[in-house]
Amino acid sequence: MRTFAFPAEWPLAGKRRTTVGIVAAIVTLALVAAVVSPRADFAQFAQLVVNGVITGSILALAGVGATLIFGIQRIANFAHGDFLTIGAYAAFVVNSLLGQNLALAAVGAMAAVALFAVVAHFVLFRPLRGRGTVALALISVGLGLVIRNGIAIVAGSEIRRFQVSQSDVIELGVVRLAPGQAVAIAVAVIVAPLVGLFLARTRVGKRMRAVADNRDLAAVAGIDIERIAVYVWILAGALAGLAGVMLGLEQGTFDPNMGVGPLFLIFTAVVLGGIGSAYGALFAGLALGLAMELSTWDGFFGGLDAKYKPVLAFVVLILLLLYRPQGLLGRARIL
Amino acid sequence: MDIFNVPFWTFVAVIAGIYTIFALGLYVQYALTGLPNFGHVAFAALAAYTMAILVIRFASPMPLAALAGLLVAVAFSFVLGIPTLRLRADYLAIATVAGGEIVRYLALNLQGLTGGPLGSIGMLGPTKLAQYNGPWDALIRRIVDALKESSIFAPVASRDFAMLLIVWPLALLLLLVFWLMARSPWGRLMRAIREDEAAAAAVGKNVFRAKMQALALGALLGGLAGLLLAWQIGIVTPDDYQPTFTFYAYLILILGGTTRIWAIPFGAALFGLLYSGTRFLNFFPLSLFDSGERAYLRLLLVGLLLIVLMAVRPQGLLGNRRQLLLQ
Amino acid sequence: MTPAPLLAARDLRKRFGGVLAVNDASIAVAPQSITALIGPNGAGKTTMFNLLSGFLRPESGAIEFDGRRCEGQPSHALAAAGLVRTFQIPRVLTRMTVLENMMLAGTGQPGEALGAALIRPRRVARRENEIRAQARELLALIRLDRLAGDYAGTLSGGQRKLLEFGRALMTRPRLLLLDEPMAGVAPTLALQLLEHIIDLRATRGMTFLVIEHDMEMVMAISDRIVVMDEGAVIAEGLPGEIQRNERVIAAYLGGIDQSAPAVSGSRA
Amino acid sequence: MNATGDPILSVRGLVARYGEDDVLRGVSLDVPAGAVVAVIGPNGSGKSTLLKTIYGLVRARRGEVVFRDRDGGARDLVGMRPHAITRLGVNMTPQLANVFADMSVRENLEIGAEVAGGRFADRLEQTLGLFPALKPALPKRAATLSGGQRQMLGIARALIADPRLLILDEPSAGLAPAVVDEVFAKVNAINAAGVSILMVEQKARQCLALADYGYVLDMGQNRMEGAGKALLADPAVIDAYLGSRSRLDLSALKRRPLSESNERGSQ
């Protein structure tokens, strides 16, 4: 199945500025609404910012992996949401069954999902390379079904929770957090910038971006593409594992279907950031999380019913596809 | 349960017929026209919910409500198609996944309208039991009565058997219609777009319009399958429209052979056999699983099958390998 | 008297990122002429084709086909109006037969309307038969008649070029834009094809705009030659003039005085 | 421009296929150590495919590509993966898609320098000495550069790896004439610093004026070769571009003038 292929268009300059402009406009709009609206409640606003950072970091961390996998391997990984579920269950084993603390559990989750991702790469995706985007996407759908139901068989389908107090409340100024949420926000604030730094400053991070950017040129520049592909799966797995733990903490409970819901939000972040652009996904994930949470703020024209947060994301996705099909930070890529 | 249980297999056959219609919609979109729709289930859900809501909450006549359900499904295909059909195939896949999830999400959360997790039963609130398929039941009952009077069918006469007599002729009729259409110049146009839309545009074909037709027709068939499922089960709940439903249809297409329309019912039958038949896998070591776990095992096998088939026989069990290898 | 051009483009501009692929280029194609568009690699010829045939939208400039403004119109509308193009790398429909590839391009197909195949089978069948006959006739012309039932994906590169040429002819175009039509086609067959092009011009009044690299071939068949370099039209004229134009030679081989004035024939 | 000793690269009977018609039908050439060798030829003659095949980006079906490494040992590059070839001391600036567009100019150079020894700061300074225009652009995203700057960055990225053989694929493609002259001046300077150069060009004149030795490729085969200046003077080279490549007997073609067809035309 061939799609339309024109001579590759070069990336357009100044797109990053456009995105910054859009975000600035949204923030300004929110502030104006806050001043104008008599119902503005800044404690609620602060609370929503915290929630938004948590949700946004989850989407950002998962999105970075998904977008790099697409950039390097041309796989739209529909099992990515289920990678998060593996992470949550691996952490659950370390935390609840082995009785270790959450930090160790998170490390265990990252290691487990990274290992799983590498195995999937060698056993499944590498041998089937070149099958076409749709075929590989369907294979990843199959993988997702195997993961989800494999977990349900092995770990049971009942609702699980981590060993953190569900009743304690931590107060940070006007913001009230459950201990699980506190851990999640701490991780978010630390890890998302670290991932950004990793991609910006380390040799491996730069190589990953280089391969996602221009595969042939990366090979000519002396980068071992096969090895970088393995690293990308490790990174994507580890980040998905961590995101899974955070999602479990944020929600309080989880079950084997946990990863199904966030999948399309992750994809939205990937498309929003420009498919294949790691920074784009990081940034777009955070922006999407914040936008979804802040849209429920009373000061924002009375606030959207919390139920419609994913609907908002869907509307954003559709508008984005209409307005700028290559994503905000990315460029037109030819498959 | 006995493996030679006629009522059980009758039920499986009804579901296979409904899946045939559902998968036919995906055939038109994906196999014929090359549009990877990963949220096909949304069309079925929208039609079923619209029908149920109109009958229960607005006391509409059921046939009219069913028609409205189909229209809503088609309208949704335009919502998905207009922004994405000009783009690369993978964007459509992502947008349709999102669309499917949104529909299910709304069904779960718009409690006042949809009954929330309870679905149609809860549409009138907790105390009143809501029903939408009175006229359908009457029709089925009349068929059952007629069957009981005939000498041949009397032993097997049941509600499911009556349903079978509606679903399968309808499925075969639709297969015939779309078989004819696939062979017509219209079908040639769709296949041309699947192969290379720039080439079709270069010889004067309106590619966008054609793709929109395929998406809308697929939505119509998906919606019809949703209605039949709603009538068959008797209630509509969000759980009946999980995203995996879409991928069952992909599996049916691949089991049959993606390029052959008449392979769809075989794929559906095979899928029904595999899916339902796994509950008879109660010998050791599978007997170690309880029935709940075996349900997950079934889904796991579906996923595994999808992987293995895509990897080993992407052209399907009955498909044409040579054709697939061409590029 | 020079007739009004069938296709006229003025000051077309198209930018890809920072690069001007087509830079204020103008071109005129006289009715029933064979016009060649030549130029070195990267001169912007194919982008020009994409602009003229509606596959790309120009940033500025105007295109007129048959006296009507048509910039910004979608490619299928232009093709339906009689402006049809082929591609440098032939786009054949690989998992369809050679005959189906041809028949797809037939004009006025009632059977392409949704449901017509079921509602008016007679009319559809009649038109199908006409189109099939026309396709077989053209397949004989391009010597692919024996392969009519084969999947197009099994054809060689040269055969695909021929099939695309034949498929374009099925649309009964008034103006055919051919992008390197002879690349990879066996020499003897190429010669026959050139004859057909000349014949089609004479018998059906067809007009051709051809991108071609074989200069001798260009010289042999074209009435006028337009030369592009770096996105701009640098010369235009009769074949004899172009061949001796130092600026054209410089465009191909590089170097020397780029400021030399273009040898330009009278603009249509 | 001193060609001495054994060739640093010799290609023998290379056969490859890429796409539909872009085919190598047995190409041979030598790059003497320290020399500039130009491969010219019209569109579709297989020039770019030749470079991609040498570099393992396109699979060679037959033939050999021998590279003489730093210790004088002969290595057959056929079957080696591109990054391994780069690590032997070869580098390439591809045509057009020659930078990491999403990354900054500095990052492009960092990626390029990874295979080189020594401190990056030193290598950067050395490279910027040759490409001073890139210095103020270091923090910019490569996507924002002009075509000429991109080409310079593409060459700088290859050069910063300290290659012994630099391969350039149509460095003049898509550039304005003044920029083309600048690019060729850089190529000359790079060669003067001791780097052997194999370049493929469509614009033959500047390229041959600079080259020690040239090959003319046509239809995927060697057609002519000789010293750069000698080829430059050969009218047969012009014929290779502007003449007939299909060897058709076009005299058989019945040519009808426009006026005649106008009268006969049906519309």
Image (cartoon, rainbow, N blue to C red):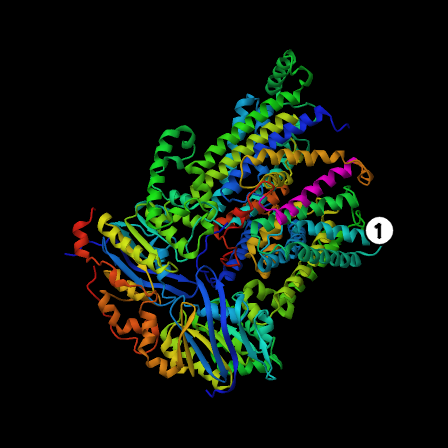
Residue lying at 84% horizontally and 56% vertically, measured from the top left: A100
Q: Which residue does the numbered mark 1 point to in the structure image?
A: A97
Q: Is residue D41 left or right of residue A41?
A: left
Taking the magenta stretch, the answer to whether it contains residue A190 is: no
Q: Is residue D163 above or below residue B80?
A: below
Q: Amino acid at mark 1?
A: Leu
Give the x, y percent position of residue A17: 51, 62
Considering depth in this image, is B248 or D71 the residue closer to the camera?
D71
Considering depth in this image, is B54 or A89 the residue closer to the camera?
A89
Considering depth in this image, is A143 or D137 the residue closer to the camera?
A143
Considering depth in this image, is B182 or A120 the residue closer to the camera?
B182
Q: Under tag 1, what secondary structure? A: helix
Instruction: Tell me the chain of label 1.
Output: A
Please state the extent of the stretch shown in magenta in the rendering.
B291-315
- Based on the displayed image, in which of its 4 quarters is residue C128 positioned? top left
| Residue sitting at the far left | C1
Main secondary structure type of the part rendered in magenta: helix
Taking the magenta stretch, the answer to whether it contains residue B309 is: yes
Q: Is residue C66 left or right of residue B65?
A: left
Give the x, y percent position of residue D231: 36, 80
Give the x, y percent position of residue A120: 68, 55
Q: Is residue A253 visible?
A: no
Q: How many marks?
A: 1
